[in-house]
Image (spheres, helix red, strand yellow):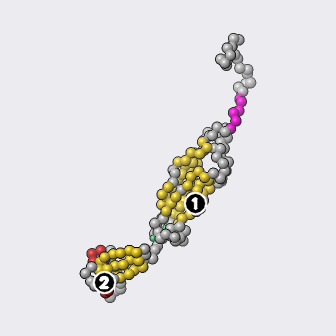
Amino acid sequence: MSIQFGAAVGYWNLTNTAVFYKLKDLYIFQPIGIPVKFSTVIIVIEDENDNSPNFTYIEKVITIPDDILIGSIITTVVATDMDKPNTNFSAIEYNITGGNGTGYFDIGKETGEVTTLEDLNRKPSNKSQIYDIIIQAQDKAFPFNSVHESMIIIVDDAGNNPPVITFPEDNSFLKMPEVCMIFSCI
Ligand SMILES: [Ca+2]
Ligand SMILES: [Ca+2]
């Protein structure tokens, strides 16, 4: 690492000649072997939005019952950003950017809570309900940095649909033997 203070001064090799301190955003460079009052340099480093958020917690596959109530929280995702805290460079908001059809699920922009938006009750004719949604975490800078992750939500039959009695298609009667013991028929 080297740093330039101007054409007349030239370069100061900080790796070999300087003691380095960091106090929050203050960087203090002090060359070794030179009286401190003539040599200490304080540099304030401005942050840049050079980091994208990263998911630190996200469930990749979730199974929920199909009788889950609308608005239920099914999971909460968490992302962090390495840029300066308490700035738009590191503040994060969440969105669902794909796989959500007409809006089966929602996510709290600030909380990361994934909730149901529709009645997902499985109808008898449905074999399965699998949703592959894309969740985005982005910082609030302009332009922003973002990251995307896939989340598979399997909606499982909770057995909450009443049984339906069906008859043979030709409406024939069930046949049973003439002698039929109790609890052993059919
Ligand atoms: Ca930064
Ligand atoms: Ca950032």
**Residue at x 67%, y 39% (from the top left corner):** 160
Which is more toward the observer, 63 or 168? 63
Question: Is residue 37 placed above or below 170 in the rendered structure?
Answer: below
Q: Report whether residue 90 is seen.
A: yes
Which amino acid, mark 2?
Answer: Val
Could you tell which of marks 2 and 1 lies nearer the N-terminus?
2
**Residue at x 47%, y 69% (from the top left corner):** 83
Q: Which mark is residue 176?
A: none
Magenta segment: 161-166
Question: Is residue 137 placed above or below 28 in the rendered structure?
Answer: above
**Residue at x 30%, y 84% (from the top left corner):** 36
Q: Report whether residue 125 is seen.
A: no
In the rendered structure, does residue 130 fall within the stretch colored magenta? Answer: no
Image coords of residue 161 (percent x, y): 68, 38
User: Marks 2 and 1, how far apart in space?
Assistant: 49 Å
Residue 109, located in which quarter of the rendered image? bottom right
- Residue linked to disc 1: 111
- Residue linked to disc 2: 36
Quarter of the rendered image showing ligand 1: bottom left
